[in-house]
Amino acid sequence: MRAVLLLGMFLLSGLAWGEACVVRSQAERLDVKVCQQNRSIPPNLFRSGFCQPQLKGQTVAVEFVEQCPIGAYGVCRNARVGGTPYQQDVHYYGVASDATYLKAYCEQQSKGVWMAR
């Protein structure tokens, strides 16, 4: 019983740390910053797959944080992830004029709810 309790506490502590990741990608004339806040993706999969984009020709930096930082101009809440049952909130930073396209993508492709900030 005690082992089960300790295992449960370990798993819960793993969920509390790093359940968001800030992804910054840069190319010649492109600087993009998003933050993915995990809702239902298994923690190991979130860290090893969802927060490790492979973007050809771009430099990518990933930082794990407990929560997405303030300052996003829009958030896609409950975004479905690529044909899976998993959900995340995607926070967008940078060029606010992109919101028109991101809102459509959020609602139509990701089946999320767009929230402008």
Image (spheres, rainbow, N blue to C red):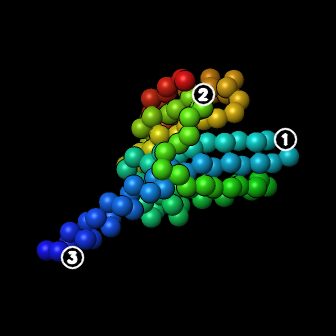
- For the C terminus, the image quarter is top right
Write the residue at 84% across / 41% down: 29
Write the residue at 38% across / 57% down: 15
CA distance separating discs 1 and 2: 21 Å
- Measured along the vertical axis of the image, is residue 79 above or below residue 42? above
CA distance separating discs 2 and 3: 45 Å
Can you give x and y, in whole percent of width and height, for residue 44 in the image? 45, 64
Q: Nearer the viewer, residue 48 or 102?
A: 48
Write the residue at 66% across / 58% down: 54
Mark 1 or mark 2: whose residue is earlier in sequence: 1
- Left or right, 11 with respect to 117, comes to left
Q: Amino acid at mark 2?
A: Tyr
- Mark 3 against mark 1, which lies toward the viewer? 3
- Measured along the vertical axis of the image, is residue 10 above or below residue 111? below
Q: Which residue is mark 2?
A: 73
Q: Which residue is mark 3?
A: 3
- Mark 2 against mark 3, which lies toward the viewer? 3
How busy is the neighbourhood of tag 3: few (under 14 within 10 Å), some, or many (20 plus)? few
Provide the secondary structure element on which disc 3 rests: helix
Instruction: List the single residue furthest toward the left.
Output: 1
Q: Amino acid at mark 3?
A: Ala
Provide the secondary structure element on which disc 2 rests: loop
Can you give x and y, in whole percent of width and height, for residue 67 in the image? 49, 45
Mark 2 or mark 3: whose residue is earlier in sequence: 3
- Left or right, 116 with respect to 112, comes to right
How busy is the neighbourhood of tag 2: few (under 14 within 10 Å), some, or many (20 plus)? some
Can you give x and y, in whole percent of width and height, for residue 49 in the image? 53, 61
- Left or right, 75 with respect to 9, comes to right
- Mark 1 against mark 2, which lies toward the viewer? 2
- For the N terminus, the image quarter is bottom left
Q: Which residue is mark 1?
A: 29
Q: Quadrant of residue 51?
A: bottom right
